[in-house]
Image (spheres, coloured by chain):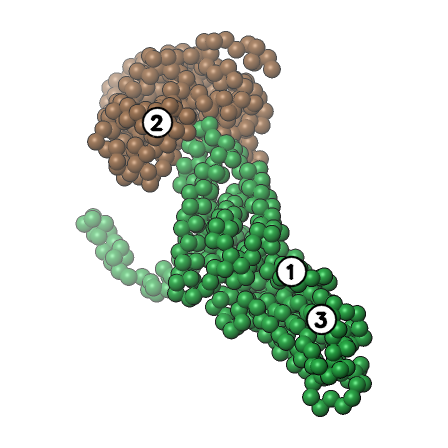
Chain colours: A brown, B green
């Protein structure tokens, strides 16, 4: 396979043309991506866009219908067993044993990977993830935030080279979310590669690189700045009275692709700058509103990408 | 809240008309939809009664006939032949083997290959003609009193039948020979001696199957399978890890049942306790492997329970635990040979009641090993290593 030969040591994930269908419905379509070693790669997209399926194909839990590639230099089709030894996968739904304690869960993982001192390794991990004092608590009785820390602890325990995190912060409070991301950055600084899927825009901005996937198609990738620049979207931020009325009026007009309220302001965006300006010109004179030329937010870009992809792929 | 009440003062809180029936109806519709989606449950609704009816109707026979019988003919005489013929005519006996010495008899009876042994002693006909009233020996495996009882009862009228045809000697107001029956192993025909050892196997089948039948589906239903599969563990390793703890559990359970059987019910252990322990462990492992195989086939825990039930039912009916094995039609006997309980019921009765040794039980022990290996092979190949 050419991909194995092309593999360079600083690329952790290198896959080409991955496709996967379930029951005749294509969930991932012709997906290619490269993730640099030691980077934090954000995987964004709406629910059901194929993020989980892609992650499962990377760690050997699903076999791609077509396409090929490598994960840490190993072929994702043939070397699933080797990849499993080097990859920590944190599932979207808590998938450790609810009826085992924190310590027992970690010792199980340590033994399964054949670590020489399973008890010691579990003890160290408990201290690292801040669960000291809760060792004997059953995993099922932990709160969402603690469960998530335990899951991260379990998948980093066997010293993996690559972490695949599937919506790790869903349903976790903001403080726990921040701590979690600090931990991810620490791990990346130690040389670990992290692929993390998320819905949160603020989390996307904490990634070195991001990829946006919708309806199984990878629509954009690069750094946050590159993705925003690549969107070619022009945005006005409007402040003033009766923004709801203005929004309803503008929606659907020529040159206006998206109108979205942001707190006390309104984002009005369009891909064709000239057409957008022509439509907006009629409202700019109105003293009730203040118009300001601004950068589109990442969310604007994604919603625009999603809207466009829906037109393209969903007919 | 007050705003809502102001708009709909009554509708929001008033009990709707026929509320009880509407809510019950809503629940009923939902249950029917779920039942329709669960194809396996639907199949069970049909399969379980049909299977029970067919097995009870066609396979089970409480007054069994054509029971396997061995003969030891020490002399070839017309009288001997007509006695055997008369025995076969009762339809209770079917001569399956001819042996050449008494030791062979004992082996066949101990291993359960025959239920009766008939011995026509040397010089029998001459002794009859001389009026010595010699004895014709019929030994029976009476561990199962039902199987042996009616056949032994039929022997009484046999002498007359045999005499009508062949014996033209003198005038026999009293019998010229006697049939001496020897009900071995359970001479008092106590059914508990037969039931208790069989129960060891029945209880183990039920509990062991369920332990492992739920094991893989539980991981899938609780979502832990996803984590497990992403870690470097192989199907055989998962299987051994899940079976071995229950071998110990099963062993404790078996000891408990056997212990109670001996202490409370006075069932003897005539054979080697060590052999019983070893073969019981084998039987436990076989059942656990079969349960584990079920668990790799079904979709959820309910289906696992249903499949175990489907397996348990014929095990009870066709194994010889409840009804005499030899009395079943041939097709049912073949089915029975495919069930571990059949072999274990023979083993446990033979060791406890007949004092059988390894040599008598080779066939059944090998059958258990084969069944275990087949189950394990299916389980390991069926185990899905991906979530595809």
Q: Which residue is mark 2?
A: A118
Of residues B202 and A300, the one drawn nearer to the viewer in this rendering: B202
Pick the residue in front: B323 or B76.
B76
- What residue appears at the point 71 percent right and 66 percent down from the top-left corner? B72
- Residue A270 x/y as whole percent: 40, 18
Q: In which quadrant will I find the N terminus of chain A?
A: top right
Q: Quick one: B358 or B303, which is closer to the camera?
A: B358
Q: Which residue is mark 1?
A: B103
Where on the picture, by quarter, is residue B318?
bottom right
Quote the CA–CA distance across marks 2 and 1: 59 Å
Does B167 sit above or below residue A109?
below
Q: Secondary structure at mark 3?
A: loop
Mark 3 surroundings: few (<14), some (14-19) or many (≥20) residues within 10 A: some
Residue pointed to by mark 3: B121
Question: Can residue B269 be seen in the rendering of this structure?
Answer: yes
Q: Is residue B214 left or right of residue B326?
A: left
Near mark 1 (Cα within 10 A), the count class, few <14, some 14-19 or many ≥20, is: few
Element at label 2: helix
Distance in Å between CA atoms under marks 3 and 2? 73 Å
Residue A251: tell me if it is visible.
no
**Chain letter for the residue marked with disc 1 in the picture:** B
Q: Is residue A2 left or right of residue A193?
A: right
First reached walking from the N terminus: tag 3 or tag 1 = 1
């Amino acid at each position: 396979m050419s991909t194995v030969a092309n593999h360079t040591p600083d690329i952790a994930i290198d896959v080409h043309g991955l496709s996967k269908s379930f029951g005749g419905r294509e969930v991932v379509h012709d997906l290619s991506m490269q993730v640099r070693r030691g980077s934090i790669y954000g995987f964004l997209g709406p629910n059901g866009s194929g993020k989980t399926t892609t992650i499962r194909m990377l760690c050997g839990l699903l076999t791609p219908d077509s396409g090929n590639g490598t994960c840490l230099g190993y072929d994702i089709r043939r070397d699933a067993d080797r990849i499993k030894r080097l990859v920590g996968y944190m599932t979207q739904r808590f998938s450790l044993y609810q009826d085992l304690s924190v310590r027992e869960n970690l010792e199980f993982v340590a033994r399964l990977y054949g670590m020489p001192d399973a008890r010691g390794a579990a003890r160290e991990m408990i201290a690292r993830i801040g669960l000291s004092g809760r060792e004997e608590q059953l995993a099922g009785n932990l709160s969402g935030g603690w469960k998530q820390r335990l899951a991260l602890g379990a998948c980093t325990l066997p010293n993996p080279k690559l972490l695949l995190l599937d919506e790790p912060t869903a349903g976790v409070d903001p403080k726990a979310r921040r701590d979690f991301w600090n931990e991810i950055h620490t791990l990346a600084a130690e040389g670990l590669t992290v692929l993390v899927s998320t819905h949160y825009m603020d989390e996307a901005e904490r990634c070195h690189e991001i990829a946006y996937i919708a309806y199984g198609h990878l629509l954009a990738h690069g750094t946050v700045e590159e993705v925003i620049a690549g969107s070619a979207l022009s945005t006005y931020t409007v402040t003033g009275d009766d923004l709801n009325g203005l929004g309803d009026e503008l929606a659907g007009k020529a040159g206006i692709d998206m109108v979205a309220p942001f707190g006390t302001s309104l984002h009005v965006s369009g891909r064709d700058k000239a057409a957008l300006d022509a439509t907006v010109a009629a409202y700019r004179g109105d003293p009730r509103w203040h118009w300001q030329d601004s950068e589109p937010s990442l969310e604007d870009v994604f919603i625009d990408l999603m809207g466009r992809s829906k037109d393209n792929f969903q007919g | 809240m007050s705003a809502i009440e102001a708009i709909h003062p009554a509708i929001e809180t008033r009990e709707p008309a026929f509320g009880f029936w509407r809510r019950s109806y809503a629940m009923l519709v939902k249950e029917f939809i779920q039942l329709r989606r669960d194809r396996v449950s639907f199949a069970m609704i049909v399969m379980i009664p049909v299977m029970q009816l067919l097995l009870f109707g066609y396979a089970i026979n409480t007054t069994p006939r054509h029971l396997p019988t061995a003969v030891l003919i020490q002399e070839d005489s017309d009288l001997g032949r007509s006695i055997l013929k008369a025995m076969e005519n009762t339809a209770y006996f079917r001569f399956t083997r001819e042996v050449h010495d008494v030791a062979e008899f004992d082996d066949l009876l101990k291993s359960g290959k025959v239920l009766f042994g008939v011995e026509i002693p040397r010089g029998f006909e001459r002794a009859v003609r001389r009026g010595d009233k010699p004895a014709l020996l019929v030994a029976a495996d009476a561990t199962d009193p039902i199987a042996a009882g009616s056949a032994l009862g039929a022997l009484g009228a046999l002498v007359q039948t045999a005499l009508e045809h062949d014996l033209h000697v003198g005038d026999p107001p009293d019998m010229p020979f006697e049939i001496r029956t020897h009900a071995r192993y359970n001479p008092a025909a106590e059914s508990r001696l037969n039931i208790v050892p069989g129960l060891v196997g029945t209880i183990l089948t039920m509990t062991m199957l369920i332990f492992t039948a739920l094991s893989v589906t539980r991981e899938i239903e609780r979502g832990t399978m996803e984590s497990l599969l992403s870690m470097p563990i192989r199907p055989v390793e998962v299987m051994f890890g899940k079976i071995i703890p229950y071998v110990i559990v099963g062993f404790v359970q078996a000891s408990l049942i056997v212990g109670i059987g001996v202490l409370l019910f006075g069932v003897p252990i005539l054979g080697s306790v060590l052999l019983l322990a070893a073969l019981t462990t084998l039987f436990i492992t076989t059942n656990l492997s079969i349960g584990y195989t079920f668990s790799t086939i079904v979709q959820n825990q309910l289906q696992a329970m249903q499949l175990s039930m489907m397996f348990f039912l014929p095990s009870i009916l066709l194994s010889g635990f409840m009804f005499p094995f030899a009395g079943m039609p041939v097709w049912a006997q073949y089915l029975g040979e495919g069930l571990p309980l059949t072999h274990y019921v023979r083993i446990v009765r033979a060791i406890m009641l007949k004092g059988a040794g390894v040599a008598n039980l080779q066939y059944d022990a090998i059958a258990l090993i084969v069944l275990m290996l087949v189950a394990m092979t299916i389980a390991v190949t069926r185990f899905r290593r991906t979530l595809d």
